[in-house]
Amino acid sequence: MGLRRLEGEERLEIWAEKYRPKTLDDIVNRESIVRRLKGFIREGNLPHLLFIGPAGSGKTAAILALAHDFYGRYGEDYRPHVLELNASDERGIGVIKGRVKSFAHASTFGGVPFKLIIMDEADNLTRDAQPALRRIMEKFSTVRFCLIGNYQSKIIEPIQSRCALFFFPPYGDDVVAARVMYIAEREGVEITDGGVKAITDLSRGDLRKAINILQAASTLGIIDESTVYEVISRVQPDEVRKMVMAALNGDFLKARGLLRDLLIGRGLSGFDMVKQIYKELFNMPAIPEEYRLELLSELGDIDYRLTQGATDEVQLSAFLARLVLTGSKIIGRSEFL
Ligand SMILES: Nc1ncnc2c1ncn2[C@@H]1O[C@H](COP(=O)(O)OP(=O)(O)O)[C@@H](O)[C@H]1O
Ligand SMILES: [Mg+2]
């Protein structure tokens, strides 16, 4: 089987999504977290939640499974009752006053007691947005928040004290290995012990990363240690250049499609991507110097955020959006074509 490329709106079927647990019973390994969450369901009462942990530690999986089970008790599909804000959305006071407030204002329906607002990367909320969020938490009795972040310390204390706190440590190697073998079997992919170990070593407790590497390596036949290292080390300067060009030329959707192709289809890490993008921007004569410096320094920030556990795709999508903006400011855009 050859590598599938993304064309237009076509998407890879992403295994990390396909194997996302639907219910709390599908969640592996997080016994004490699941027990506490099930307690809330039994009581029919949900506190505000604060989920802290690194990328790929099951935070989103847990809240979506909880939402599924909680609203399921009312015979409801959870989606209409849930507002999911992703980190690529604006992180400032604007989104709090706008989308969050209007969702909070709308009344509940279907007999459910509360709506749920899931805010990913809540620890990136700006300083002025956090007190506004706290006021909304106090004011609306029919809304529950699930705030998700990498660092507890970046959430102001008055918000922390209103939330039930849950820690999601990185998964142990045994858990990652078991999940990789489970998915490989379901997908009919042959993988050696060495292949499992290589994936486990590379993903360091990040289950999404492990599943993405498995999926990328699966296109090369039987997976052993060398296939895994081959697939993650293949750098694709042409593909990265195409992605950067697409963004500078204002085609965000195409750029984002290429980004996903590289991250998921090829299993490149966020760090590999940052390195490649850096090289491309550094060498692109059509970018005026003042923009180049700004972009490179922003790329440095992203590199830092990735070391702090931020999600590759989210950070890099935001950077692509930034490139679109820069591209539109640069006169003579045809130079990028
Ligand atoms: N406890 C779990 N049981 C089964 N699969 C999991 C579990 N935690 C994570 N996964 C898998 O890993 C992927 C990434 O997990 P996710 O919850 O999105 O991580 P986070 O939100 O902490 O970055 C999920 O899509 C799912 O496939
Ligand atoms: Mg998440």
Image (cartoon, rainbow, N blue to C red):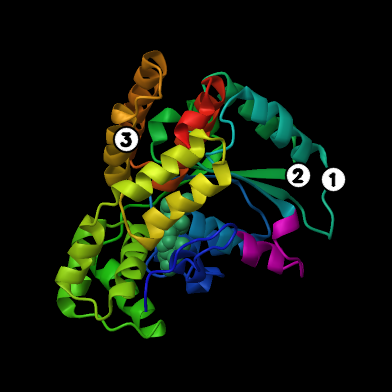
Label 3 near label 1: C-beta < 8 Å? no
* Whole-number angstrom distance, CA of label 1 to CA of label 2: 8 Å
Q: Nearer the viewer, residue 223 or 329?
A: 329
- Density class for disc 1 (Cα within 10 Å; few <14, some 14-19, many ≥20) is few
Q: Amino acid at mark 3?
A: Glu
Residue 277 is one of the magenta-drawn residues: no
Left/right of residue 144 with respect to residue 179 in the rendered view = right
Label 2 near label 1: C-beta < 8 Å? yes
Residue 51, how many percent across, how many down?
Answer: 47, 46
Of discs 1 and 3, which sits in the foreground? 3
In the rendered image, the vertical position of residue 267 relative to residue 184, given as above or below: above
* Whole-number angstrom distance, CA of label 1 to CA of label 3: 50 Å
In the rendered image, the vertical position of residue 104 relative to residue 283, given as above or below: below
Residue under the image location 50 percent in, 47 percent down: 256
Q: How many marks do you count on the picture?
A: 3
Judge: label 2 CB < 8 Å from ligand 2: no
Residue 111, how many percent across, how many down?
Answer: 83, 59
Residue 71 is one of the magenta-drawn residues: yes
What residue sits right under mark 3 in the picture?
Answer: 280
Res. 107 mark: 1
